[in-house]
Amino acid sequence: MSLDLTGEGLAVERQREDCERIVRSREWSLVETYVDNSISATDKTKVRPSYDRMVADFKAKRFDALVCWDLDRLTRQPRQLEDWIDAAEEQGLRLVTANGEADLSTDGGRMYARIKAAVARAEVERKGARQSRAQQQRAKQGRPPRGVRATGYTLDGEVIAAEAQAVRAVFEAFATGTSLKALAAALSGAERLTREVGDKTHIQVLPASVPVLPTRSGQPWNPSTVTGMLRNPRYAGWSMLAGEIVRDESGRPVQGQWEPIVQDSLWLDVQRRLDDPKRKSNKTGTDRKHLGSGLYLCGICDRPVKAHNVRYRCAGHVMRTRAAVDAFVLEIVRARLARLDLSDLLPTVQEAEIDQLHEQIEQARGRIERARADYRAELIDGPLYKEIKAEAEASIQRLDAERLSLSASPATAAILAAEDPVEAFDNADLATRRAVIDMLAVVRLFPAPRGLKVFNPDTVKIQPRARARGLPATEP
Ligand SMILES: [Zn+2]
C-alpha cells in the first residue's frame, strides 16, 4: 500500500484482515504475511523487500497459495504478473484476491488479471502525459505555470513590485546597449557599474534604487541567467510553455492572466537584439559597430546591407562608402529631430496595424512551412526551397521592423522627449541611434554611378515610415 495524502495507508490493517478471512474460509493455514508499505508496485527500480522475499519463499516451496487484497497490490508490472500466471498454471499455485475477482486457477480469472494489469500499466504511462497536458492546458488558458516562479512574480502570478522594477530596469538597460555581462554584475550587486555613452558621459547600468536580486540557484547572476530573464515572454504578458510563446488556433500569442512587467514592444526589441549574431556579449556596448549594417537595405534586393571594410555592401548589388552614406543619413535625421512637432512621432497604440503585420508575418512563416513540406515530399528541390525560405525570412525581418517601429522603445522615446533631441541623439549610443533611424525611416542604398567620386545623395533613398511625418523624403 503506497502511502498517500488521503490516509489510505491506514487501511493496510483492514486489507490484512480481509486476506486472513479468505485464508480461514478456505481452511488454509497462514504461512507468512508480506507487507511492503508505501513502496510503489509500479516502479521496477524500487526495491520491495517483502515482495522479493515472497518470490524466494515461493521458489523454496514454502507456500502453495497466495492471497492478495488486490492484484495491483501484488504487482503492476505485466511481466511479473505473467510469472505468477505461469506459476499458477505450471506449478498449481492458487492465487486469489480478496475482492474475489481474480482467481488465477480459472481462465476467466487469468483474463481478468491480465486486463487489469494492462490497464494499470497504461494508467501509469498516461499519468506523465496527463501532467504535461494539464500544463499545456494551463498555458493555453493563459494561467501562470505551476511550480515555477519568475523573478518579479509570485507563484500565483502576482507582481512583486521591487523585483518587477529590477526586471524592467534590466530590459531597458539591455535595450539601450548595456551588455549581458555588465547587467549580471550589476544585478548581483557587486558594484553598480557605469558605462560610457556619447562623449565622456557615464550612466549607471542600473538605477541605484534597483534591489540586488537573488537567483534561484543562489549563484551570482551570469550572462546566461540574465538572458533567461530577457527571453521570458511572461514579462510581456504572453503565456509560454517550454520557453515558447503559446499561440491560439489563429496563431496569436495567448495573453497571460497576469500583469505584464514590460511593454511587448520593448520585449520584442530585446529579442531582436538578442538574436543579432553580431552582438558581442563580452563588450560593454551590444550591437553592431556601424550605423547602417543590418539596418539599411539594398535597393536592388531589399535585404539588409553588411559592413565591408569602409563600405556597406550587398554582394553583387551595392557597394557604398560608409562615411558618406552615414553623414547623409544623419543629416536628414538631425533635420527631422530639430523640428518642433516631434510628438507626432510618438506612437499611439495601433492595434489593428500591429495585428495586420502580425498576420503577414504568420503568412510568411506559413510559406516557409509549406515549402519545407513540399521539399520533404520531393515536390520541390533544395535550391528552390532555400530561395523561398530566404525570401520569406527577409520579409519577416522587414515586417518585424515595421511592427517594432509602431511603438517607440524607452531609449528612442527618451530622445524624442529630450529638451534638445538633436544633442540627445548625437550623445546616444550606437544602438539607440540605429533605433531612432529605424523608427523614422527605411534607408535604401542604390549603386553609385561608376567613376563618380562625389557622393550623390540621389542614390540613397530615405523613405519615411508612415507615421514619421515631416521627414524629408529622398528619391533615387
Ligand atoms: Zn542586394
Image (cartoon, grey):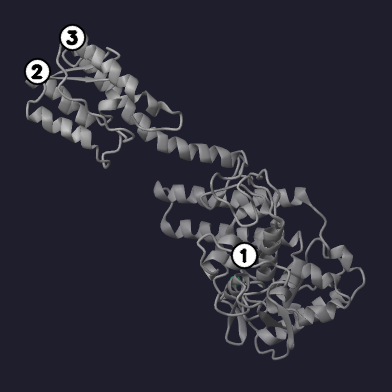
Q: Earlier in the sequence, mark 3 or mark 2?
A: 3
Mark drawn on residue 26: 3
Q: Residues within 10 Å of mark 1 (few under 14, many from 20)?
A: some
Residue that mark 1 sits on:
213
Q: Position of residue 380 (x, y in %)?
A: 43, 51
Tell me the residue that label 2 is attached to.
Answer: 92
Seen in the picture, residue 231 relative to 316 is either above or below; the reply is above
Q: Answer yes or no: disc 1 within 8 Å of ligand 1.
A: no
Task: Name the element at disc 1.
Answer: loop
Q: Decide: is 247 above or below 320.
A: above
Could you tell me which residue is drawn at 64 percent across and 52 percent down?
153
Mark 3 element type? loop
The image quarter containing residue 78 is top left
Residue type (three-letter) at the residue carrying disc 3: Arg
Label 3: few (<14), some or many (≥20) within 10 Å? few
Tell which tag, 3 or 2, sits nearer the viewer.
Answer: 3
